[in-house]
Amino acid sequence: MKNLVASIVLVFSLAFATAQVSTPAPSPFVKMEQSIGMSKVTLEYSRPGVKGRSIFGDLVPYDKIWRTGANQATKITFADDVVFNGSKLKKGTYALYTIPTKDKWTIMLNDDLTIGGNVARYSTDTEVHRSTAKSMQMSEKMESFMIFFDDLRDGSANLYIGWDKTIVQIPVEFSTDDMVMANIKRTMNGPSANDYYRAAVYYYNNDKDMDQAYEWINSATEKNPEAFWMATWKARILQKMGKKKDALTAARMALDLSKKAGNEDYMKINNDIIKALK
C-alpha cells in the first residue's frame, strides 16, 4: 500500500511540475505573406504596444541598433531576387535591424538569423544591405508596432514600419516583367519534358489510353534523352501496350542510361523488365 501511495504522489507531483500557466503574449507574434506582382514576401515579427510609454528616443533609443520589434529579431523572406530600398538583393531570408533617429532610420538586413535580440552580437561581416529611409510623423498614434505593405503595384510595393506616431517607408521592387516574359516563353514553347512525363505516368497508373501515354512519354524522352527514369517508363508503357520488341529495345536503352547515371535501383528495374519480356 505504501508503494502504491508513493507512486500516486509521484505521478501527481510530476504532473504539477510539468504544468504551465498560459497567459497572453505581451508582444504578439505575427507571420504574414504578401504577394507582390508574381513574387512573395514573408514577414515574421512581434508587436509590442505603446502602453502609455514614450517610444522613440526613450524606450527605443536613438542611434542604437534595434531588433525592430520585440522578442526575436524581425525576419523578412524574399521569394525572388529583389530591389530593396534601391539596392539589388538575392532571394532568401534575412534578419531586419534598424537604427532609428529623429529624422531618418538606417535599415540593415543581415544573413545571421541567430543574433535575435542580442544586438551586441550584431556584425557587419554578415550584413547584406544597409541604407537609410526618412522618418515621418503621423497625425494618429499606432498603438501596436506594425510592419506592413501598401501601395501595391504589378511589381512593387512600399514596406512600412510604424509605431506610436512614427512611420518609415521602404520601397520594394521585383523584376515582374522579366518573370512574365520568362513564363510566356516557357508556355509558348509548349509543355516541358516533365509535363509530358507526369501525364504519361498518370495515364499508365490509371489504365487510361496507352497510345496517348506513349505519345507523351516519347515526347518526354525526346526533350530529355538522358533521363533514365523517363526511358524506363517508356519501356513500361510499351510493355503494357503489348509491344514486346519495342519494349525490350526501350528497356535496354534505359538500362544503359541507368548504368551511365550509376543508379542501381533503375538498373534492377530495367533488368527485371528485360527478364519479363524475354
Image (spheres, helix red, strand yellow):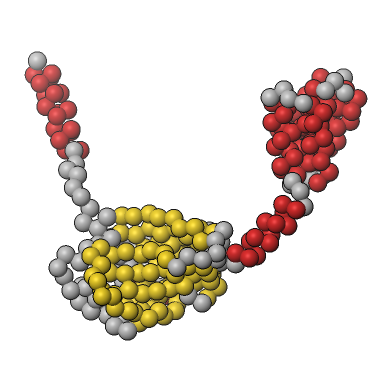
**Residue sitting at x 60%, y 64%:** 176
Q: Residue furthest bottom?
A: 103
Residue at the (34%, 79%) spot, across then down: 135
Pinpoint residue 232: horizontal percent, then vertical percent: 78, 33
Residue 60 picture quarter: bottom left
Name the residue: 91% across, 25% down.
245
Q: Is residue 92 left or right of residue 162?
A: right
The answer to which quarter of the image holds residue 139 is bottom left
Q: Position of residue 242 (x, y in %)?
A: 85, 20
Kindly indicate the quadrant of the structure image that contains residue 229: top right
Q: Count the numbered circles shown.
A: 0
**Vertical order, 202 against 120 (above or below):** above
Image quadrant occupied by the C terminus: top right
Quadrant in which the N terminus appears: top left
For image coordinates 38% across by 81% down, the residue present is 134
As drawn, is 35 to the left or to the right of 116? right
Counting from the top left corner in percent of width and height, residue 160 is at 38, 69
Q: Nearer the viewer, residue 263 or 205?
A: 205
Q: Is residue 38 above or below residue 274?
A: below
Q: In this view, does 27 lie above or below 103?
A: above
Residue toward you, 191 or 222: 191
Is residue 236 toward the left or the right of residue 48 in the image? Answer: right
Front-lying residue, 106 or 118 = 106
